[in-house]
Image: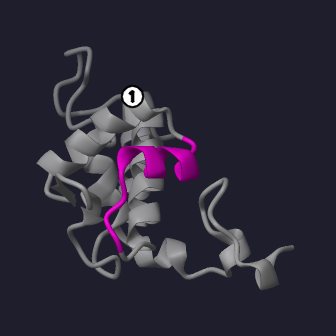
Amino acid sequence: MISQTAEYALRAIVYLADQEMPQTNAQIAEVAQIPVGYLAKVMQMLSRAGLVNAQRGLRGGFTLAHDPQVLTVLTVVNAVDPIRRFHECPLGLHGINLCPLHRSLDDAGQKVEQAFGDTTIADLLSVPQRRKPLCRFPIAPDEKR
């Protein structure tokens, strides 16, 4: 449904939203299980979109630039790989009157956009620690399965 790039961006943003200090590419990559080289490109896109702040230096790294209560999944996805919508026939055959296939695909895209737009990063974090949406998110000893 979403690209690997969008998934990696969401993993990185969710991780940063749960951190108080700047996090390096290596730290994010390890926890979110993202190849470091790929993550560097994703973080560059997120930085250009104004979703993360980058600090250089000894205590440098990335921090979230927006409140997780306001930042939506849709904003993150659109920053790196927007959801594809069909506003006219992609084959140039029907103009703005979409054929049934492209109408159905566009309707699905609209529903995905709405669901992602209604979900904030804070919503993704508002689960018990053991269910955080990262494969190897740090788990407190008292909350292990």
- Residue 36 position, x and y percent, is 43, 34
Number of marks present in the image shown: 1
Amino acid type of disc 1?
A: Gly
> Residue 90, located in which quarter of the rendered image?
top left
* 68 horizontally vs 144: left or right: left
* 144 horizontally vs 38: left or right: right
> Residue 10, located in which quarter of the rendered image?
bottom left
Where does label 1 land, which residue?
Answer: 37
Q: Which residues are magenta?
A: 21-33
Q: Residue at x 80, y 85 (%)?
A: 142
Q: Residue at x 36, y 41 (%)?
A: 106
- Residue 115 vertical position relative to residue 141 in the rendered view, above or below: above
Q: Residues within 10 Å of mark 1 (few under 14, many from 20)?
A: few
Q: Is residue 50 visible?
A: yes
Between 115 and 75, which is closer to the camera in this rendering?
A: 75
Between 96 and 32, which is closer to the camera in this rendering?
A: 32
- Residue 49 vertical position relative to residue 123 in the rendered view, above or below: above
* 136 horizontally vs 113: left or right: right
Placement of the C terminus among the 4 image quadrants = bottom right
- As drawn, which residue projects farthest toward the front? 58
- Chief secondary structure of the magenta span? helix
- Residue 19 position, x and y percent, is 42, 72
- The question of residue 23 being in magenta is answered with yes
- Residue 70 vertical position relative to residue 73 in the rendered view, above or below: below
Between 101 and 33, which is closer to the camera in this rendering?
A: 33
